[in-house]
Amino acid sequence: MWAAVAHGHGEGSGEDKGTVHAVLDPLPPELSELRVQLRRTLAPQLLVANPTGKSLVVEDETGRPFLRIGPDHAEGDLGAAAFHRTNALMAPGAIPAEASEDPRWAVVEATPNWGWFDLRLRTDSVDVPDQVVDSGKTASIGTWSLPVQFGDTVSMISGHFEYRPDANGMIQANVADLGALQGKAMVRAMPGSSRPGLFLSYYGDSPLTLMGEQDEPFLRFSQQGVEANRNSPTWATVAPAGAPSYVGNDNGSEVLWARISGGSSYGWIEPRTSYSGRVENPSQPGLVKRWQIPIQIGDSRSQIQGKSEWFPIEPEADKGH
């Protein structure tokens, strides 16, 4: 079992009594054919799948296109600073916004799907007014928007920033079903961390591959040890310091394995077990999320399933201390 006490770090302020989250608003009708998700890993990440026959063009803050998603694949402008600034978790100033060069479009994903950490969704610099904090209530405190062109139609993917006061409690993650791993592995949620993780010890004969958030090969367990796919976007978000870093590739299909453990066990940060949404009734325990991690053993597919639950903590003052 993994348990972490929920607390307010403010994503940039150690004294705020809550946190700020980027929230995706409903898509406008002209973009309804797209599949768009906003996920929170170590930073807000937009995931777009374009199953249509039209191209979706995403523009940076200056109006320069830097992503083209669809109809057959995803392309990035390698000459645009925005492409590199949004392609990995980094300090916003690591690549200056004015570092753009002449356009150099290249295929970055063989399918019409892409995920990126757009800096316009970052919450680090969002100010929370004192009166909002003092109210102790959820409040909208600003907006964000990304200009896009879908086919011949100019539109916008947009949302808002939401302040959420701290709820006094903790999230507990539990592994509920090992699927085809039953009898071949021990899997548990890692305790004692404010960032949810999993620990897996494998003793099966055939190689085990865990798939990432985009269903890409992520981690591989075998009798030779544990390996990470350096081209996995999921590895890009969870690779610990000192481990083989994320590389990425032009077509999104090449797998680049690198050994990260010589044994049969490994623990890692697993964002799919986390929950950053709103707890509707923080005074009562309840299920907040069900999650699953696809796996492949040899040629057979299965999944690890689990759930995350909220448990309130009674304030010290209410205990008569």
Image (tube, rainbow, N blue to C red):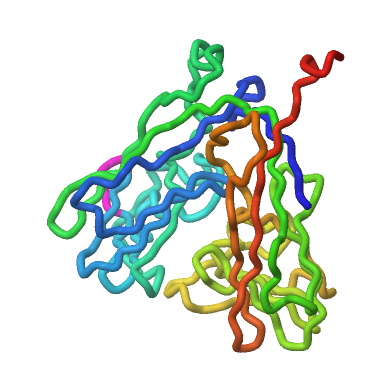
Which residues are drawn in magenta? Answer: 61-65
What x and y, as percent, mark residue 122?
48, 38
- Can residue 85 be spotted in the picture? no
Q: Residue at x 14, y 52 (%)?
A: 153
Q: Is residue 42 above or below residue 188?
A: above
Q: Is residue 284 above or below residue 112?
A: above
What x and y, as percent, mark residue 195?
70, 46
What x and y, as percent, mark residue 65?
27, 53
- Can residue 150 be spotted in the picture? yes
What residue occupies the far right of the structure in this picture?
Answer: 321
197 vs 65, left or right, is: right
Image quadrant holding the C terminus, namely: top right
> Which one is nearer the viewer's eye here, 3 or 112?
3
User: Is residue 59 highlighted in magenta?
Assistant: no
User: Is residue 64 highlighted in magenta?
Assistant: yes
Q: Provide the major secondary structure of the magenta segment.
A: loop
Q: Residue at x 29, y 61 (%)?
A: 68
What x and y, as percent, mark residue 27?
28, 47
Q: Residue at x 69, y 42 (%)?
A: 171
Q: Residue at x 52, y 67 (%)?
A: 248
> Which one is nearer the viewer's eye here, 96 or 201?
201
User: Which of the 4 image quadrants contains residue 72?
Assistant: bottom left
